[in-house]
Structures are given as structure tokens and as C-alpha cells.
Amino acid sequence: MGRISELPNDLLIKILSFLPTKVAVSTSILSKQWEFLWMWLPKLVYTSSCCYSKSEDKRLKCFLDRNLPLHKTPVIESLRLYFRYPHLEPGDIKLWVLTVVSRYVLELEISYFTYQNEQDILSSSLYTCKSLVTLKLNGMILVDVPRMVCLPCLKTLRLECMTYLNEDSLQQLLSNCPVLKDLFVQSRGGNNLRKFIVIVPSLKRLTFLGGDDHLDEIVVKTPSLKYLDFTYYSFKIHHCLIENMPKLSEAYVNVSFPILERLIGSITSVKRLTLLQVDYGSEDVYGGGFVFNQLVHLNLRMYQRYSLNVQVRLLKDSPKLRLLGLDLCRSRRDVHGTNGVIFWNQQSTVPECMLSSLQTFKFSGYLGRPEEKDLVIYVLKNAHHLKTATILFNNRFFEKNRDMIQELALSPRASTECQLVFDR
């Protein structure tokens, strides 16, 4: 211990920063030199959970009330508060937020769950914090955006399961984040989010996970977007406007048909696309006239009622495609052949990517139904530059269908380099 104490204070603080905050605080009893070292820590984490007693939470409250305003570091790099059903008052948390905002906090993360209704634990000064770069909120928190909002340095915003004071709260907040790069919004039923309006020219990444709520309006204007993750299931939408995203590189899309129809034309510049299809019986699921000129990696996942024609349509519209993944996700009943309908009609013309660029094909959830088998044979027969075709199935299918596997192995291939791989 003596040799460690001989190190410079800056180095000791660096060592303490690798410890949990509670452990770092406990070193204050070691000696006079260590008594206040922890108060120079730039990153702080405090937690309380339902297993904590009322007296433990009271001690935590007294500790933060006393020490947080006296913290010595001129800039708090990050404060993380994880409170799960604590014996704490919302006003206590609001006071701590106010304190760190006045200390030029760079990153604030709050996870808060309570037995009560959503609570207003965010100080109004948070919405005008000039130093804040990252804000992450999760849980039963009320977002009450004041009239005056200015977050000039905020680059990352994560809002999980928030409750908004009114339907314009989210839009008002976003419109005052001029350099926002990364936005994550997770909605849930009953949280009164009726409008999802994102008009942020600077945004690079957008993730929206919709719950069982029904939005009245969706507006997305993000011309600088490079990554999109969009999940929303409702088939009822009054107004939806999604503008072109010319810089989009990667997209994960899991939406109902009305949204897909409006979204698809905005993401044609994408290079990597994962599309989850719930119930599109028709081949014409997104209108006509769209070409994915940059798409090289396509993963199509389908549930319940499968239209393999959708895949063929995407192949026709993706002339530079190099990797194709097909994942048929089925229920237990469907695995035993008692549910699910598959549609696929062999095409009279071969898509351009089959002739010139497709190199990898992966089929997951294969059950050997005639349409599935015909599709695999079709790809093998027509993909002139295919290097690997991987068929994934469960053990039961393998034991019962060895002849079918042998038939696929002996089917003709347009590419002499193609390796057919069976896996479980």
C-alpha cells in the first residue's frame, strides 16, 4: 500500500477510475491522502434496486446530496444513475441532475423504474445544457420539454419507453439539437407518442422500435443518414412522409405494408439491407420503378405466410447484389408442416445479379418443401459466379430427408466454383 501511495495523484485517480464508483469511494478510509481522491473521478455510477432496503437508499440519498455538489473535477465526463424501484423521491433525482448540469456534464445516462406512474425527474436546465454530448434515458420518465431548448453539443440521444407530456414533445426536443448524429427511440403502447417526426439534417444513425401503439403521423427527413433501423407493425397510419436518404449505407426494416410502400423508395441507395416480411402475399409489395443500384448484401426474413416472389423481385431490382440471405422463421406448428403457405413462381428471365455478381447464397430454416427446393435449384442453375451456397436446417429434417439433400447436391450448377454446404 505504501508503494502505491507514492505514485502521483493523477495516476492514482486514473487507477481509481477503473474501479466501480462504490469501491473507489471506499478507498477514502485508507489514509488522509486517499480521503478525497475519489472526488476527482470524471466518471460516476450510482445504483439502487428493489433489493435495497429503505435505509440503504436513504444513505445513498444523503451521500449524493452531500458529495455531488462538492465533486472536484471541473468537468464530469459521465454520470450514470440506475434506479430500479428505489425508495427515492423524484425530486431527489431532479436535484442531482441539476447539480451535474451545472458541472458541465458530458454524458448523462438514467435508467429509472418505479411502482408509481411516470415521474418528472429531469431538471428543466437539462434541456439547455451546453456541454451535454450524450443523453440516454430509459424507463418510467416523463419528458416535459420546456419552451426554451438548446442542446448545441448533443450528438447521441437514446430514449427508451419514455412518456411524453404531449404529442409535440419529441419533435420540439429534436428540432433544437443541431449536431445530433445518433438517435434511438423505443416506443411502447400507452406512452402517448402519436407523432414520430424526425427532421434532423445532421443525423447519421436512426433507430426506431415501435410498440403496439398507433402513430397518427410519421415524418422522417434525414438527408445525411447512413444507418437506419426501423420497426413498426401497425397497419393504420394517417400520414407518412419519408424523404430520400441518398447517403444511406445500411438498413434494417421491419414494418407493415403501408409503411414499407412509403419507405422503400427512400432507401434505394442502401448497400446492406435486412428486410423482415410479415405477410406480403403479393409480389408487388413496394410498387414499381425502384432500382437498388448500390445493394450488395440482402437478407430477407419471412414469417407465417411466405412469398418467395418478393425475393425474386428484389433480385431483379438489385443488379450488383453479391450476397443473398433467406431466413424462413416459422412457428413450432409450421416446422411440423401444419401451418404456413409458400408462394413462388419460377421466373422466365434471370435477374442480372445472377448472371454477373451473386457470389454467396444462404438459406436458413429450409424444410424441403417443393417451392423451397425449386428456388435453391434455380439459384444454383442460374448464378454464374456463385462461390458458396449454404443450406441450414434442423436435425429432424436431416434424418428424414437424406435423399432430398442428395438431390440438391447433384443438381446442376452454373458456376464451377460453387461449393454447396449443408449445416444444422
Image: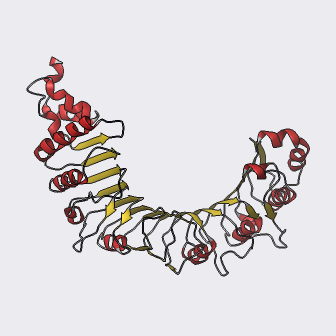
Q: Is residue 139 above or below residue 316?
A: above
* Quarter containing the C terminus: top right
In the image, 90 versus 383, the foreground residue is: 90
Q: Does the rendering let one see residue 44?
A: yes
Q: Position of residue 280 (x, y in %)?
A: 71, 69
Side (left or right) of 129 relative to 324: left
Q: Position of residue 273 (x, y in %)?
A: 59, 63
Side (left or right) of 382 relative to 197: right
The residue located at (42%, 61%) in the rendering is: 184
Q: Residue furthest left?
A: 32
Color style of the picture: secondary structure
In the image, 296 versus 110, the foreground residue is: 110
* Quarter containing the N terminus: top left
Q: Quadrant of residue 415?
A: bottom right
The residue located at (83%, 71%) in the rendering is: 347
Q: Quadrant of residue 48?
A: top left
In the image, 338 versus 354, the foreground residue is: 338
Q: Position of residue 63 (x, y in %)?
A: 17, 39
The residue located at (88%, 52%) in the rendering is: 411
Q: Quadrant of residue 13?
A: top left
Q: Does the rendering let one see residue 418?
A: no
Q: Position of residue 391 (x, y in %)?
A: 76, 48
Number of marks in picture = 0
Q: Is residue 393 above or below residue 292?
A: above
